[in-house]
Image: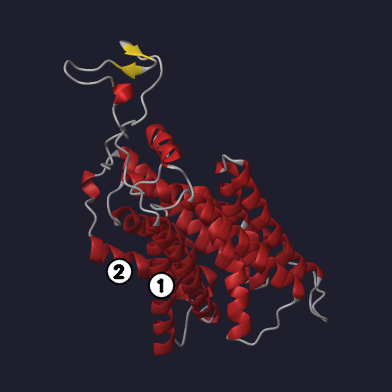
Amino acid sequence: MSPHTAPIPLVPEPGAPGTADGLPAAAPGLPPVSQRPRRLRRIRPGRTAVGVLMVLSACLSLQLGASLAIGLFPTFGPWGTTVLRVGVAALVLLALVRPPLRTWTRAQWGAVLLLGAAFAGMNGFFYAAIDRIPLGIAVTIEFLGPLAVAAALSRRLRDVLWVVLAFAGIVLFLVQNLVLRPAGDTGPLDLTGVWLVLVAAFSWGLYIVAGQRVGRLVPGTGGLAAAMAVATCMVLPVGLPELARATQITPGHVLGALGTGLFASLLPYLLEFHALKRLRSAVFGVLVSVEPAIATAVGFLVLGQAVGVWAVLAMVLVISASVGTTLSKEAESPRRQLQDEAAGTTPEGV
């Protein structure tokens, strides 16, 4: 679909002039429109499965990138690490894509700037938060953003039920981390860190909406590359002083910065950006809530971290919600897709 072309409704509007029962009059020699077979858009059920695989792969990549980023905090600080993370991804994408920035319209630039602000917020404030509060708690609270988007965009009772199920899983993660804390870990939670991660959660919700809009208005991945550059410019004033104070930089730090940019920004955002073209925002919002479960599983299998009963139950709830919302999307009827396309709400390329 061209970024400048509105979707063409395939379902006629009732009551249009010169129609019977809301259908256009037939041209001479042709049967009435009501008697002609409708030409349905070819449905490709596997497209949703590809989108789901992209989201899950992005979650895994983010976990690896986060582990690399935490190792950079003592040297570069959280905001300095954010500059490295987003800046490396922006430079690589701009070099590969070379978007035609001068040809973009005001609407396209507005969407790109909004996405860039979302990138800056969800990265910078999250890193600043995990410098103050435990990673597991921060990750769990941050998922309030995509869950809020999923709840706001749910149009059927079944969609709402999947969101509620995922939210219940998130609450259980909070119970595991805040109420059932390990012995000796009784210190008060840093409220500044909580507020920081709430800003990151809002930014993540904004990212889902803005990312889908950029995917619809800007062809290819040029919008993503430009948004990364915008995000780098936004976090640079805060991160540059931390980078300037960095001393004793080793080749390991350089490799860590490159790895963080690749696994925590470039690869996951590319995957999510293309997934947003295949999935509804509500579906995407529920799917990404599986990340706390992935993080818990990785911690148990790779790092040998203990997993409590509450955490296991939370994983079951969140994964069930993700699977359920995916199957619901696959089962949508062609008629519903035609109605969505007529209203201009179907993700591009579905």
Judged from this view, the residue extending furthest toward the top is 18
Q: Is residue 57 left or right of residue 200?
A: left
Query: Measured from the top left, where is residue 313 in percent x and y?
Result: 72, 68
Q: Secondary structure at mark 1?
A: helix
**In percent of the image, x 47 and y 52: which residue is there?**
330
- The residue sitting at 59% across, 74% down in the picture is 295
- Residue 254 horizontal/vertical position (percent): 39, 83
Q: Amino acid at mark 2?
A: Val
Q: Position of residue 335 (x, y in %)?
A: 43, 37
Image marks 2 and 1: residues in contact by CB distance under 8 Å: yes
Q: Quadrant of residue 258?
A: bottom left
Q: Is residue 205 left or right of residue 57?
A: right
Q: Is residue 157 visible?
A: yes
Measured in 3D between alpha carbons, the distance from the residue under mark 2 to the one under mark 1, in whole angstroms, is: 9 Å
19 displayed left or right of 260: left
Q: Nearer the viewer, residue 258 or 42?
A: 42
In this rendering, is residue 33 above or below 100?
Answer: above
In this view of the protein, which residue sits in the foreground, 164 or 71? Answer: 164
Residue beneath the point at 16% across and 18% down: 29
The residue type indicated by label 1 comes to: Gly
Q: Is residue 7 above or below residue 263?
A: above
Name the residue that disc number 2 marks.
92
Q: Which residue is mark 1?
A: 261
Q: Quadrant of residue 5?
A: top left
Q: Residue at x 42, y 34 (%)?
A: 339
| Among the two numbered marks 2 and 1 on one chain, the one whose residue lies closer to the N terminus | 2
225 versus 350 height, above or below: below
Q: Secondary structure at mark 2?
A: helix
- Picture layout, residue 12 above or below residue 237: above
Query: Is residue 250 in view?
Result: no
- What colour scheme does the image use? secondary structure
Q: Quadrant of the N terminus?
A: top left
